[in-house]
Amino acid sequence: MTIKEIENQIIEEFSVFDEWMDKYQYIIDLGKQLTLIDEKEKTEENLIKGCQSRVWLCCKEEEGKLFFFADSDAIITKGIISLLIRVFNGQTAEDILNADLNFIKEIGLESNLSPTRSNGLLSMIKQIKLYALAYKEKNKNN
């Protein structure tokens, strides 16, 4: 699936909820299903800077596609990173770098997060795009 198709799927899933508390609960439930980062990857190097809670993220490349693994010590943050991983997993570096992530605004996440969580969300997106940029540059030089 393309990033856009996955985003549309997420928007559709969130459209069944009228109340934000229900959306938060859904985000928390998504976080509980997250494929967690290996414990040995919970290093300072994989810690995302700019998040109020602790969020670890690592990336692996397989056959030109990027795959992400993460964990967080905050349940809502774990749900948010799980949404981002769902969108970006199995995509090319180029597609990740070109993604505009409309789903964040469409599901109301942008306007319903506290300022510190919004900063954390931006930091998570930035780190994912930095991984994509690094893989793109590495492959360009090979």
Image (spheres, rainbow, N blue to C red):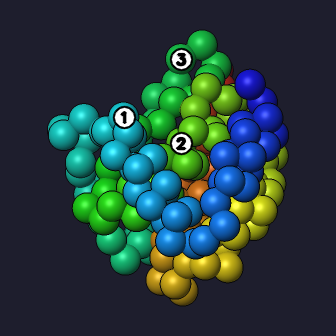
Q: Quadrant of the C terminus?
A: top right
Please give the label number shown on residue 85.
Answer: 2
Residue at disc 2, secondary structure: helix
64 left or right of 61? right
The residue sitting at 57% across, 39% down in the picture is 86
Q: CA distance from mark 1 to mark 2?
A: 10 Å
Q: CA distance from mark 3 to mark 1?
A: 17 Å
Q: Quadrant of the N terminus?
A: top right
Q: Residues within 10 Å of mark 1 (few under 14, many from 20)?
A: few
Q: Is residue 97 placed above or below 140 in the rendered structure?
A: below
The residue sitting at 46% across, 29% down in the picture is 60
Residue at disc 3, secondary structure: strand
> Which of the two discs, 3 and 1, labels the residue nearer the N terminus?
1
Residue at disc 1, secondary structure: loop
Provide the residue designation for mark 1. Answer: 35
Residue 80 in the image: x percent, y percent? 50, 57
Q: Answer whether labels 1 and 2 touch (C-beta < 8 Å).
A: yes
Circle 1: residue type: Thr
Does residue 124 show up?
yes
Please give the label number shown on residue 62.
Answer: 3
Q: Nearer the viewer, residue 52 or 6?
A: 6
> Which of the two discs, 3 and 2, labels the residue nearer the N terminus?
3
Residue 12 in the image: x percent, y percent? 74, 46
Q: Answer whether labels 3 and 1 touch (C-beta < 8 Å).
A: no
Does residue 136 show up?
no
Residue 51 in the image: x percent, y percent? 41, 72
Q: Nearer the viewer, residue 63 or 122?
A: 122
Q: CA distance from mark 3 to mark 2?
A: 15 Å
Circle 2: residue type: Ile
